[in-house]
Amino acid sequence: MKEFIINENEAGQRFDKYLAKLLREAPKSFFYKMMRKKNITLNGKKATGNEKLLSGDHVKLFLSDETFEKFSGSIAAPRAHHVLDIIYEDENILLINKPAGMLSQPADDGTPSLVEYLTGYLLENGSLTEEDLRTFRPSVCNRLDRNTSGLIAAGKSLVGLQTLSEMFKLRELHKYYLCLVEGVLDEEKYIKGYLAKDKKSNKVTIYKQEKENALPIETRYFPLENNGKRTLLKVELITGRAHQIRAHLASEGHSVVGDPKYGKTEKKLSGQLLHSFQMEFPELTGVLSYLSGKIFTAPVPEIFLTKLKEEQLEESYYENLE
C-alpha cells in the first residue's frame, strides 16, 4: 500500500488529473477501475475522480510495489547545473535574467534549457524534492529567443505557475524590452501587423494586411536616444509572437543590431542586441496580490552595455535603469 498526502502544489486539481500524473504510465481505465474497486481511495472513501483535491487530503493506493513501480515511471526530472541570475524570488515565483545563448524551454535534441537549470536549482536548495516531481514540475511562463537575454518568469508553486500563465495569456503583465536598432527613430509609435511563421526555416514574415495563417501582432516602441545612425529603443511587447520584435522592427526598416535572421551580423556580436528589460505587474487579487503594481528590472548583459558605450548611448540606458 502507498499513501500520499496532498500538498499545496497538488491541491485545487481534480483527483483523476492527480492520478494521471502519479501513475503516468497507466491507462486512464486502470485508475478508474481501481477507484471503483476501492483499491484507490481518497480520505478513506470511494472516489469517482472528479473530486477537487484539498491540501491535507489522504490518498491511498492498495497496489503491489511492482504495479506501482510499473505505472509510476521514473520520477527523476532532466536537470542541469548553471548559476542563475535571479532578479526576484518568493515561495511562488521566480524572475530570472536569462543570458543570451540559453534556451528557454527543452529542445528535441536534449540541449539543457532554463527549465532544467531551474529544476536543478530548486532541488538543490530544498524548495522541491524528487518525490514532489511525481505530480508537479516547475516551469517558465514566457519564452525568449535563444539569443535574446533578459527577464523570464517561472512558477515555483502550482498557484504561482497558474497565476503567471493566466497573466501572460490575458496580456495583463506589461513586458518591456531594450534594443539597439539601425536608423534614426525619434517618435513613439504603435504598430500593428500580421505574422506568419515558416517552421522549416524557423523564420517569420510580417504583413501589413490580414493574411491566411498569419496572426495579428501589436508592438509599441519609445525612442530613448539616437546618435544619428542608430537608436536605443524601449519596446512594449503587447502580443507575444515568435520573433515578433525582431521581425516587426525589421519590417519597418529598423532591424535590431546584430540580428543574423532579420538584419545583418556584426563583428564581436554573437546575436541580436535585444533584452527583456522590465516586467510590470497589474493590480492583483488572491495569492499573488503582494506583487500588485511592482516593477522588476534586469540589467543588460555586458556585451550590450559595451556596444552602447561605443555608440555613445549609454547615458540614456542608465537613466531608464533607475
Image (cartoon, grey):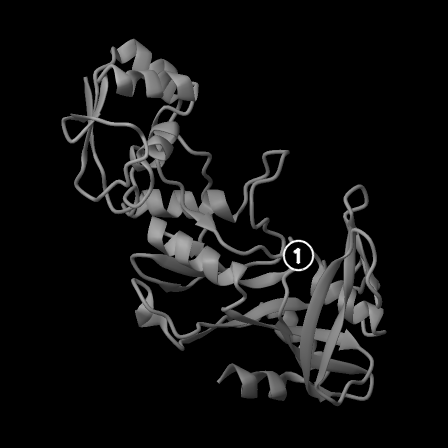
The one nearer the camera, 219 or 69, is: 219
Determine whether, in the image, residue 159 is placed left or right of residue 224. left
Q: Amino acid at mark 1?
A: Asn
Q: Residue at x 84, y 66 (%)?
A: 209
Q: Position of residue 123 (x, y in %)?
A: 33, 42
In the image, residue 86 above or below residue 255: above
Q: Is residue 240 visible?
A: yes
Instruction: List x then y, in percent, for residue 165.
Output: 47, 55
Helix, strand or loop at mark 1: loop
Residue 145 vs 231, above or below: the answer is above
Split into 4 quadrants, where in the image is the N terminus?
Answer: top left
Above or below, 200 relative to 267: above
Answer left or right for 320 relative to 209. Answer: left
Q: Which residue is mark 1?
A: 147
- Count neighbours of disc 1 (C-alpha within 10 A) and say few if under 14, some if 14 to 19, many if 20 or more: some
In the rendered image, residue 104, in percent from the top left (x then y), is placed at 56, 50
Q: Is residue 268 visible?
A: no
Q: Provide residue 99's location: percent of width, then percent of height.
A: 56, 58
Nearest to the observer: residue 174 or residue 233: 174
Q: How many marks?
A: 1
The one of 158 and 124 positioned closer to us in this rendering: 158
* Snapshot quadrant of residue 207: bottom right
Residue 10 versus residue 242: which sits nearer the camera? 10
Give the quadrant of residue 244: bottom right
Taking the spot 72% from the left edge, 63% from the top edge, the residue there is: 216
Q: Tell me which residue sits at (65%, 55%) in the image.
A: 145
